[in-house]
Amino acid sequence: MYSRYDFGPWFISGGAQPPVPSGPDRAGLHHSANPFDESDIYVATRNPDGTWSEAVNLGLNGAYGDSGGMEINGGNTFVWLQGSGTAGNIVMANRNPDGTWGTPVDPGPAINDHSAAGVQDNPHLTADGKALWFTSNRATGLGGRDIWFSSNSSGSWSAPANVGAPGLCLAGKPPVLQCMPVARASAAYSGQLYCVFELRFFAASIRAITLANWAFTRMSLTNPSSL
């Protein structure tokens, strides 16, 4: 994700100071008077000598803010958070044979909470594209921004399930900012998550959570590391 705006003043002031435009105007970046609507996803590739290429617009960005993306399937499938001007929704797209991207698809009403205060963020897919993790503050959670999970069977996504207690989603715990499934060398899901928990402005705790005896149809955490 790239934006011209520096959000440091906004974070430090607790939202009292607006973000400040300070970065360069990259090619392809869409502009907005609203800092929260101006962000696009860019990609850079590693050169043979180990350096990185100039970042280029990925070409799937919408008219509002796009962020929190990741790819699977050799870079041919992408999942990310796309803004609508009033909210952010988790969407997915596939790359066409000519290199362009197909129209972003909403995984379904169960994934995105469209209530007035509903927030979903930081979507992550397993390598096979069959499991989706994301954070959300939806009303059926355990308080704050929890981790949610959905599995894909025959092209349809299941209703998201809160990963639950013990340890991860409890009232009084710091909200989860990001949660990423960890792959084995074979690129299969390893049964472990890396989670980032917000403690205060500019401070976060990163923990590795091991999910013992995990199955996509079972939503219990039997052996999380201590939080």
Image: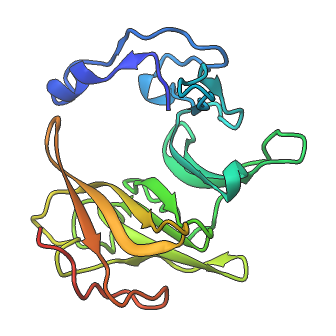
In this rendering, would 14 be left or right of 192?
left
Percent position of residue 38, x then y: 51, 25
Percent position of residue 36, x then y: 43, 29
Say which quarter of the image contains residue 19: top left
Give the position of the C terminus as an image quadrant.
Answer: bottom left
Vertical side of 156 occupied by 207: above or below: above
Percent position of residue 143, x then y: 21, 67
Which residue corresponds to the image point at 53% horizontal and 46% vertical from the top-left?
69
Along the line of sight, the residue nearer the viewer: 2 or 117? 2
Which residue corresponds to the image point at 19% horizontal and 23% vertical from the top-left?
16
Which residue corresponds to the image point at 63% horizontal and 29% vertical from the top-left?
48
Percent position of residue 96, x then y: 85, 48
Say which quarter of the image contains residue 161: bottom left
In this rendering, would 211 be left or right of 125?
left
Q: Is residue 114 visible?
A: no
Say which quarter of the image contains residue 120: bottom left
